[in-house]
Each structure stands twice: as structure tokens, then as C-alpha cells.
Amino acid sequence: MRPLSLLRFLALFLLMAPLAVPAGAAIGGWSTPVGLWSPLDHSGKPRGLIAIYENGGLYYGRIEPLSPTDDRSARCTHCTGRRKDQPLDGLLLMRHLRYRNGEYIGGDILDPRTGRIYGCELRLIDGGRKLVMRGYLGIPLLGRSEVWQRMQGQPGVKVWPVPGA
């Protein structure tokens, strides 16, 4: 290869290489939402612990106890269907999210305080260290977003076994 052709090849390669990285890939971080997450309150303090996992190409999230002293008798009394009166620890909170164009869409999320089910979307931010969860009624425009923080690698974070699971 002539020197000028080699330079053109390298320049073209450097320009095109970022396009080869999938849109959802968090460079230098996590590329999927699989793991432990804590929704943050308005002051940035953790409010709970959610384990997100993948099954058959779809993503799900369940409530995990924060510590062994958590009240394990709490139940989803306002829920309907299979989740009615189920313990909050281990409760399936998010269902059926699928990856598309850098986002996780098409799923739903349960509000265990009211038993209502909302549409749900997730988007990783900050190199996969945080995610934006958007819950909505009907269309994403009619909803609200929360920031969740990834808890892997955080001191003292452990997934406690759920009795009977």
C-alpha cells in the first residue's frame, strides 16, 4: 500500500469504527441493565433494591431486600392477579422489556403501593452506572422518569435470599 492510501485507510477506519459499536453498548461500563439497582429519591438517596435479569431475550426486575432486618411480612395487598398478596421481597416488579435501538422498551412496571401497572422503558446512562426508568400511562409522554443507580461494587450491597423462593 502506498503511504497516502494507508493514511486514507486509517482515517476512514477511525471515522467508521465508532459506528460498529452497538447503540446500547456503554463503552467503559456495563452494556445491559442486568444487575442490582437502587431507585434514588429526590435527594439522591437509595430507596430500595431491584434485581434486573434477562430471560429469553426479555428483561425483568424483582424487588430484593436491602438488609436481613427488612420487614419480610409486607405484601402487595393492592396488586391483582398472580401478584395479589404476594410478599414484596422477590415480587416481580418489571416485565417483558426488550432491547431496541439503545433502549429497553415495551414492558410494564408495577407500583406495589397502589397495585397499578404502567408502561415502562429503561435507558442506560453514565456508562451503565445509572439508568433512567420511565413509567407511563398509555404513551411515554404521559409519565415520569426516575434515575436508578447500579449497586454492584457498592460497599455492603448483598442480595439476601428470599424465603420460599
Image: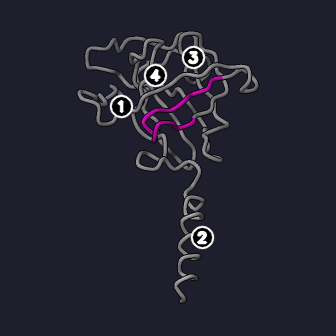
* Residue that sits furthest to the left in the current view: 156
- Left/right of residue 83 with respect to residue 64 in the rendered view: right
Q: Which residue is mark 4?
A: 39
Looking at the picture, which amino acid does disc 4 mark?
Answer: Pro
Please say whether residue 132 is one of the residues in the magenta stretch: yes
Magenta-tinted stretch = 123-135
Picture quadrant of residue 113: top right
Residue plotted at (43% across, 12% down) = 43
Examine the rendered structure and indicate whether residue 98 appears above or below residue 19.
Answer: above
Disc 1 to disc 3, C-alpha distance: 21 Å
The residue drawn where x is 72% and y is 20% is 137
Main SS, magenta residues? strand
Q: Earlier in the sequence, mark 4 or mark 1?
A: 4
In front of the other: label 4 or label 3? 4
Q: Please, what is the three-letter code of the amino acid marked with disc 2?
A: Leu
Say if 117 sits above or below 34 in the image: above
Quadrant placement of the C terminus: top left
Q: Nearer the viewer, residue 142 or 112?
A: 142
Q: Residue sitting at 46 percent across and 29 percent down?
A: 62
CB atoms at circles 3 and 2 under 8 Å apart?
A: no
Tag in front: 3 or 2: 2
Classify mark 4: residues with Cα within 10 Å, few (<14), some (14-19) or many (20+).
many
Check disc 2 and report the residue beneath it: 12
Please name the residue that numbered disc 1 is placed on: 151
